[in-house]
Amino acid sequence: MDKDRFEKGLAQRKATLGAEYVEKNLAAADDFTRPFQEAMTEWCWGFGWGDETIDAKTRSMMNLAMIGALGKMQEWETHCRGARTNGVSVEEIRAIIHVVGIYCGVPQALECFRVARKVLEEEGAL
């Protein structure tokens, strides 16, 4: 493991998803899941998110589109919260969901809207 890239990834992961959320996930890791948590933090957050070519807001918008396309709604909810932290507006989330609907189908867009509504209502944005 590249310790510097891990630390960079850990900082980015906490900045986007919240320190409490990240620390809870890391604390829950055991011998079975810890290697993946460490690798994901280093690779995804350190290497991927650590590349400053794409800013955090744009990266969050890309993630919402890709994760929405995959239909991984628990992760979509997590990244919807992170997207808001990274400055993605309600209108931009709506537009992203429209694109998911066009390319992945209406049922998937409806799932994204359901989860987005939950997140946005919890934060008082709707």
Image: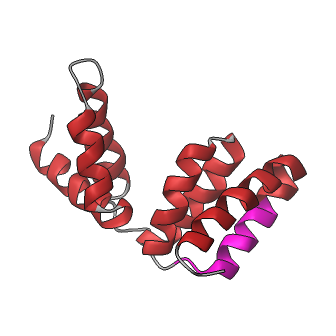
Quadrant of the drawing holding the N terminus: top left
Q: Give yes or no for residue 24 being in the magenta stretch.
A: no
The residue lying toward the viewer, choosing from 2 and 84, is 84
Q: Residue furthest left?
A: 3
Q: Is residue 3 visible?
A: yes
Q: Position of residue 66 (x, y in %)?
A: 63, 50
| Residue situated in front as seen by the camera: 59 or 35 | 35
* Image-quadrant location for residue 90: bottom right
Left/right of residue 98 with respect to residue 2 in the rendered view: right
Picture layout, residue 37 above or below residue 58: above
User: Is 70 positioned to the left or the right of 54 in the image?
Assistant: right
- Residue shown at 10%/44% (left/top)? 3
Q: How many marks?
A: 0
Q: Which residues are magenta?
A: 88-99
Q: Is residue 65 left or right of residue 78?
A: right
Q: Give the percent coordinates (x, y) of residue 10.
A: 22, 53
Q: Is residue 17 above or below residue 31?
A: below
Q: Is residue 59 visible?
A: no
In this view of the protein, which residue sits in the foreground, 118 or 23? 118
Residue that sits furthest to the top in the current view: 32
Residue at the (27%, 46%) spot, across then down: 24
Please provide percent x and percent y for residue 69: 71, 47
Residue 106 at x, y percent in the picture: 89, 52
State the predominant SS element of the stretch in magenta: helix
* Residue at position x 82%, y 55% in the image: 110
Quick check: 93 above or below 49? below
Which quarter of the figure is the C terminus placed in? bottom right
Which sits in the foreground, 121 or 38?
121
The colour scheme is secondary structure
